[in-house]
Image (tube, helix red, strand yellow):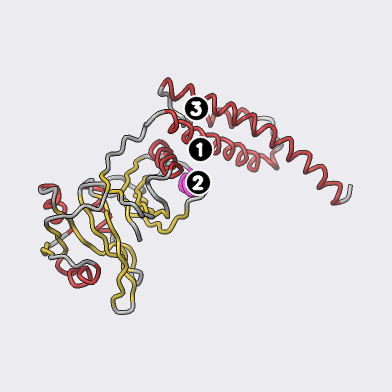
């Protein structure tokens, strides 16, 4: 059999796979409808492991890993479809947000960042010692906000700011790029409200990966499957648990898009911990 003949056979197999895939997605649609009615979980890792073990029991050893990866991807695509379908039938997200812009009476900043932040925002700023001090002010007075340097492209991201956001349920509301000593820096405002403004094109998220092999790769693949661009990723050690990390990501996405909501819904259900850290334009 020459290469041309092999390709003809491959085309036949691919067409059969396509037919079976379409049939499987119809079944996934039925599953989504039933689970939306009953409130059953879409992601059941124990059942997926059971299915994989059953299907690979008699597979040839030299292609077992490849077949396992193939089955896992089919399951991932099926779950993605089910999350999106569920959102068309119910509203499981229940994320409270305000529509912006929202003006604040006071803006607080760390003293050492005040000059840089003034390049981005023309507000009167009150100096504080730390981001924790800013968080206390914001939580005690809902009409206040903070300003800080989220990312210095010459050094890296601010772990202090991100840790404060995670620990205090505070959200990034806006972002501006400034140049300081020929270095680009992201300066953001943040408050206790999640604010979604028309024109927002960035989402900041935090998640903790499940403690199993390939979990981070699976999440990054999930984001790519939604055709959403990942513009930033970094991690902060979880001080309360050994060998675990908070992952912070920035997405080129708008919160109001249905595909973005489906991704958020899937991340909420398939990570150990999840938080939406802000919506903004940048």
Residue at x-position 30% and y-position 65%: 176
Q: Is residue 87 left or right of residue 152?
A: right
Residue at x-position 48% and y-position 49%: 220
Q: Position of residue 208 (x, y in %)?
A: 37, 45
Secondary element at image label 2: loop
Q: Nearer the viewer, residue 68 or 61?
A: 68
Q: Position of residue 169 (x, y in %)?
A: 23, 45
First along the sequence among labels 1 and 3: 3
Residue at x-position 50% and y-position 37%: 80
Circle 3 is placed at which residue position? 32
Residue at x-position 76% and y-position 38%: 13
Secondary element at image label 3: helix
- The picture quadrant where one finds residue 252 is bottom left
Circle 2 is placed at which residue position? 226
Residue 88 vertical position relative to residue 171 in the rendered view, above or below: above
First along the sequence among labels 2 and 1: 1
Q: Is residue 87 left or right of residue 170?
A: right
Q: CA distance from mark 2 to mark 1?
A: 8 Å
Q: Is residue 124 left or right of residue 254?
A: left
Image mark for residue 80: 1
Secondary element at image label 1: helix
* Disc 2 crowd, CA 10 A, few/some/many (<14, 14-19, 20+): few
Q: CA distance from mark 1 to mark 3?
A: 10 Å
| Residues rendered magenta in the picture | 213-220
Asked if disc 2 and disc 1 are in contact, CB closer than 8 Å, the reply is yes
Q: Position of residue 188 (x, y in %)?
A: 26, 60
């Amino acid at each position: 059999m020459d290469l041309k003949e092999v390709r003809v056979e491959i085309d036949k197999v691919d067409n059969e796979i396509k037919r079976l895939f379409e049939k499987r997605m119809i079944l996934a649609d039925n599953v989504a409808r039933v689970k939306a009615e009953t409130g059953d979980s879409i992601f059941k890792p124990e059942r997926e492991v059971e299915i994989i073990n059953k299907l690979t029991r008699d597979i040839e050893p030299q292609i077992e890993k490849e077949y396992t990866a193939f089955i896992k991807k089919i399951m991932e695509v099926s779950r993605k479809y089910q999350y999106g379908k569920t959102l068309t039938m119910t509203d499981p997200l229940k994320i409270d947000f305000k529509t912006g812009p929202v003006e604040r009476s006071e803006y607080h900043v760390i003293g050492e960042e005040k000059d840089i932040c003034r390049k981005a925002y023309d507000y009167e700023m009150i100096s504080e010692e730390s981001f924790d001090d800013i968080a206390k002010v914001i939580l005690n007075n809902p009409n206040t906000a903070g300003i800080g340097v989220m990312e210095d492209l010459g050094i890296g991201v601010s772990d202090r700011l991100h840790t404060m956001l995670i620990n205090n349920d505070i959200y990034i509301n806006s972002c501006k790029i400034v140049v300081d000593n020929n270095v680009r820096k992201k300066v953001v405002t943040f408050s206790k409200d999640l604010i979604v403004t028309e024109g927002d094109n960035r989402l900041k998220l935090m998640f903790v990966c499940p403690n199993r092999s390939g979990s981070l790769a699976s999440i990054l693949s999930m984001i790519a499957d939604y055709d959403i661009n990942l513009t930033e990723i970094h991690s902060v050690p979880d001080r309360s648990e050994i060998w675990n990390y908070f992952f912070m990501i920035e997405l080129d996405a708008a919160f109001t898009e249905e595909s973005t909501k489906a991704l958020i819904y899937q991340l909420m259900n398939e990570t150990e911990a999840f938080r939406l850290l802000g919506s903004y334009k940048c």
